[in-house]
Image (cartoon, rainbow, N blue to C red):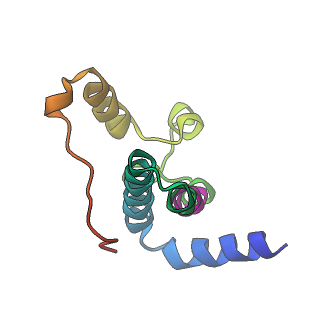
Amino acid sequence: MGVDLALEALVKAYERRPGLAAQKAAWHRQQAELCHQRGEPDHEVHHYDRADNYEAVLDRLVRCRRCGRELTDPVSIERKIGPECYRRDARAQTAEPADQLPLNTGTDPL
């Protein structure tokens, strides 16, 4: 029951700014990966949990998990990512590792 109330509060807080929820989800995923690389499992779990919370907000609002835009296409809704972000991710997966952006090591900018 408490989890549903917390999710509803997050949905209400981000329904006008879903792009911010998408940014926070991405940032927490990056931080979780850094914590994994550094061998900090407690912090890794914390960041994955936070990212999951923001992604649940985006799912409830039917928004892209990458940019926060509204999803209308059934395929995009099923993937939970819009067509532009999907194409961008597909290109990033085929790019050379040197072409990919490094993970941010700073504090939460949001």
Residue most extreme to the front: 39
Q: Left or right: 76 with respect to 85?
A: right
Image x and y of residue 81, in percent? 46, 41
Expressed as whole percent of the image width and height from the top left, the position of residue 65 reads 46, 50
State the residue at coordinates (37%, 59%): 27
Q: Going by the picture, which residue comes out furthest to the left?
A: 98
Residue occupying the point 54% across, 35% down: 79
Q: Give the residue at the far top of this rendering.
A: 94
Along the line of sight, the residue nearer the viewer: 62 or 20: 20
Res. 86 image quadrant: top left
Q: In this view, does 110 lie to the left or right of 1?
A: left
Q: Can residue 68 be seen in this view?
A: no
Q: Is residue 30 visible?
A: yes
Say which quadrant the C terminus sits in.
Answer: bottom left
Task: Decide if residue 5 is on the left or right side of residue 71.
Answer: right
Image position of 63 with respect to 83: above or below: below
Residue 76 in picture, x, y percent from top left: 50, 36
Magenta region, mostly helix, strand or loop? Answer: helix
- Quadrant position of the N terminus in the picture: bottom right
Image height of 71 relative to 86, above or below: below
Q: Is residue 23 above or below residue 5?
A: above
In the image, 48 versus 20, the foreground residue is 48
Tally of numbered tags = 0
The residue range painted magenta reads: 49-57
Identify the image quadrant of residue 56.
bottom right
Please tell me which residue is depicted at 26% across the width and 30% down the height of the picture: 92
Is 105 one of the magenta-colored residues? no
In x, y percent, where is residue 6? Answer: 69, 76
Question: Residue 43 versus residue 95: which sits nearer the camera?
Answer: 43
Q: Which residue is drawn at 26% across and 26% down?
A: 91
